[in-house]
Image (cartoon, helix red, strand yellow):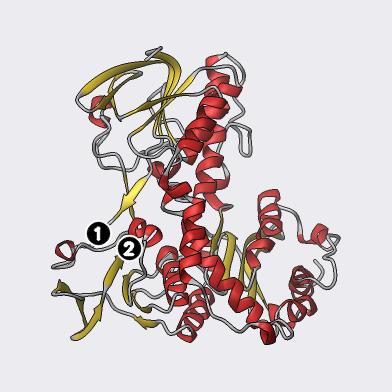
Amino acid sequence: MAETEYDVIIIGAGAVAENVADRVVQGGLTAVLIESELVGGECSYWACMPSKALLRSGIALRAAQNVGGAKEAITGGLDVAAVLERRNSFTSNWDDKGQVDWVHGAGIDLVRGHGRITGEKKVTVELDGTFTELTARHAVVVSTGSDPVLPDIPGLTEVSPWTPREATSARDIPNSLAIIGGGVVAVEMATAYASFGCEVTIMARSGLLGDQEDFAGEIVGEALKELGVTIVNAAPSVVSRAGPVTITVDGRSFEAQEILVATGRQPRTTDIGLETVELTPGDWMTVDDTLRVPDSDWLYATGDVNHRALLTHQGKYQARAAGDVIVARALGKPVANAKWGAHVATADHAAVPQVTFSDPEVASVGLTSTAAEKAGYSIRVVDYDIGNVAGASVHTDDYSGKARMVVDEDRQVILGVTFVGPDVSEMLHAATIAVVGEIPISRLWHAVPAYPTINEVWLRLLETYGRP
């Protein structure tokens, strides 16, 4: 290895870590990534990209089947083998050469192995029993991500359950799949596998998409049932395997060829040396809005590991802020850490956009009505049936969907927006801009949606709210 000292050391080489390194190098500093698995991380190989590739074909087929003139031309069903092959192309068949080439092309160094913090600004990398000590001149950034949580259900670990990794990388589709959990991963994988003809059962004690507006889980749940998915609003009490997996829920037994656990995440911090800097291994890493660990002038944490917003796009957002602020501090430049400043991740608090790629989609940003009330805002909730918009009826026959706008009545600005319906993900960024920009309702009246598009729902929401 050519160097052992860098301006910035990043533990991890996923999408978030890559963005930290890129910003640091663009700012004139040197950076090295440390990775024990595939460069590109969870999103590239086991999460965002393969999961959306698995979902898209089935959704596209059903979309065509819902438009007169197109549906009459469709004579076949989904080609599952072709879907899996397309998925493989998005993961480069789990080969990270392309990602490694990008890293080197961006002027970033890469060290393979398991990185552990061993002292102030020091990281030791272990690979096959060989140890390399690296020193950072300015900062160490932890971008190690998160792992699935396995709930404490008797017999679960013994049946070799799938985690999201196995679900998104499966080479063969099981005849039946049981899913524990009701969040985004559970809903998306239920949608994908039901599209493949797999018999799917979701076991979700608290229902579906519990952190969204109530109607989101209700609408998606009905759509999943139409796809043939069984939804059980209870958690398993015991699991066993003798050939198929047997799951006992409320005294009833269900069988499935495979079982997927999608019940949450935990930080990858158990073996990265946090104890050497008086932090607790296995805990989420607390950071300030510049992504720096309190009481430290050199340690940062970006992405899932800080538990602010477990979404790739938010992690990249944090990475850009962290990379830029590290450069500013290293070069003695001013730090813009006021709200919405260049060096802070303000959006993490109340302006996070998120899409659940179910069928229909759920797209949301900002606070739900429940969260806004809990935060003490005086709010008004405005709902509208997206199917009543002319553009929606042209887009899909019998379009069904719902929009909700949560307004801060004191300032007359939008706190949150939720859309549920086909292709609503492409409408989300306008809502994100409105929330982040705190654009007054009176000004939004002048943002005229083109006709006939689904975005006309914005006009209908404003008409329902009324002129301020």
List x then y, in percent, for residue 267.
Answer: 32, 45
Residue 61 is tagged as none
Instruction: Tell me: 245 left or right of 139.
Output: left
Whichever of labels 1 and 2 marks the residue nearer the N terminus, that label is 1
Instruction: Tell me: 353 left or right of 194.
Output: right
Residue in view at x 37 percent, y 61 percent: 171
Residue 95's place in the image compared with 34, above or below, is below
Front-lying residue, 22 or 420: 22
Q: Residues within 10 Å of mark 2 (few under 14, many from 20)?
A: some
Residue 150 is tagged as 1
Residue in view at x 39 percent, y 34 percent: 12
Question: Could one spot residue 116 in this view of the protein?
Answer: yes
Q: What residue would you read off at disc 2?
A: 263
Residue 233's place in the image compared with 136, above or below, is below
Residue 342 found in image quarter: top right
Residue 298's place in the image compared with 76, above or below, is above
Residue 40's place in the image compared with 378, above or below, is above
Residue in view at x 69 percent, y 63 percent: 427
List x then y, in percent, for residue 119.
Answer: 28, 19
